[in-house]
Image: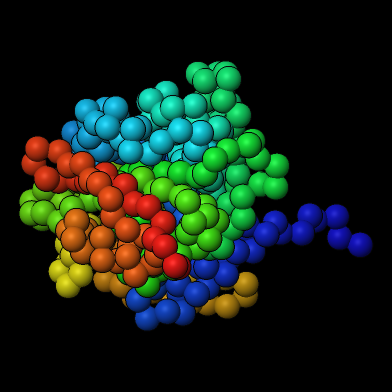
Amino acid sequence: MSTTNPPSADTQNLQQALLEALIRSDHRISPVWFYDHRGSALFEDITQLPSYYPTRTEISILDDNLEAIAKAIGSNRLVVELGSGSSRKTVPLLKALDQPAGYVPVDISADYLHQAADDLSQQLPGLPVIPLVADFTTPFALPPSLPDHNNRLGFFPGSTIGNLAAPEAQSLLKHCHTVLGDDAAFLIGVDLDKSPEVLIPAYDDPEGVTAEFNRNLLVRINRELGLDIDVQAFAHEARYLTNPARIEMHLVATTDQTINVDGQNHTLAAGESFHTETSHKYTIEGFAQLAQQAGWQLTQHWCDAQNRFAVLLLKAAENQ
């Protein structure tokens, strides 16, 4: 009898995701697999880089408009944050809100999530914090035991919704309407379309942190699936495309690669790439239309002076 532990569900799902990426003509793999503990830490490093404007711009928008945002949101909301990461944007919001009922951070990286939840509990000791380990890009349910609350607020900062194609974004917004309820509000950060001279360096920084973040996906695959992919044989590349406006991140094979998964060889020719992330860029009007089709109405929005980024407040539309 073998004493080897069976693979975990996460390992099986990662292997399936890799197999599907190798079989697909565009070799696309979901960016959710970026976020092991090292990937989550690297992304936090990216947010501190001079060329990566979204995080500091969004924080500035929130800080400058917290009073108005909190007033528009109302009191006794249960705050549900998607892809919470370190939750560092959340503390000022929770402090500004009128008697928030509790906080449910949702993230796929369990260790990182629980660490961040513990840190937040220390900063806000009177607030119930109920972390939920889940991939929010697929249907999920809130924990069964929640503090009493009047209604719910979805919080989705960082323009992470831009990682989803329009049909996927609509599906997520529809599901969030169901999870959050008919009296819900939704505060979402959206990166606005702009010059590629600004966008490209944000995803291909001169310091090379984003390249390391991108390649860490292969490091994780090697570690968790027991493979020996030559990580350094893949070049990080960021591409700006239009119709729809978006940045794509790729790991481009610099030489022919043979990858053996589950006893089968799969080949990537030199110049082919794993498509690891897409970040869609919006206009406010375009995103409002997408949200309306998913059961939400835009009520207010706030931008920075250069109109690089927007924070949008949605409310659940009636008769959805």
Q: Residue furthest right?
A: 1
158 sits left or right of 122 in the view? left
Which quadrant is home to the C terminus?
bottom left
* Residue 53 x/y as whole percent: 20, 39
* Residue 293 x/y as whole percent: 34, 70
Which quadrant is home to the N terminus?
bottom right
User: Measuring 22% from the left and 28% from the top, which residue is drawn there?
Assistant: 64
Q: Nearer the viewer, residue 28 or 90?
A: 90
**Residue 41 placement: quadrant:** top left
The answer to whether residue 229 is seen in the rendering is no
46 sits left or right of 12 in the view? left
* Residue 131 x/y as whole percent: 60, 39
In the image, residue 124 sits, relative to residue 204, either above or below, namely above
278 sits left or right of 22 in the view? left
User: Measuring 58% from the left and 38% from the top, which residue is drawn there?
Assistant: 149
In the image, residue 266 sits, relative to residue 100, either above or below, namely below
Q: How is the image coloured?
A: rainbow
Q: Nearer the viewer, residue 218 or 196?
A: 196
In the image, residue 35 sits, relative to residue 240, either above or below, namely above
**Residue 93 placement: quadrant:** top left
* Residue 226 x/y as whole percent: 60, 57
The answer to whether residue 191 is seen in the rendering is yes
User: Measuring 63% from the left and 37% from the top, which residue is drawn there?
Assistant: 148
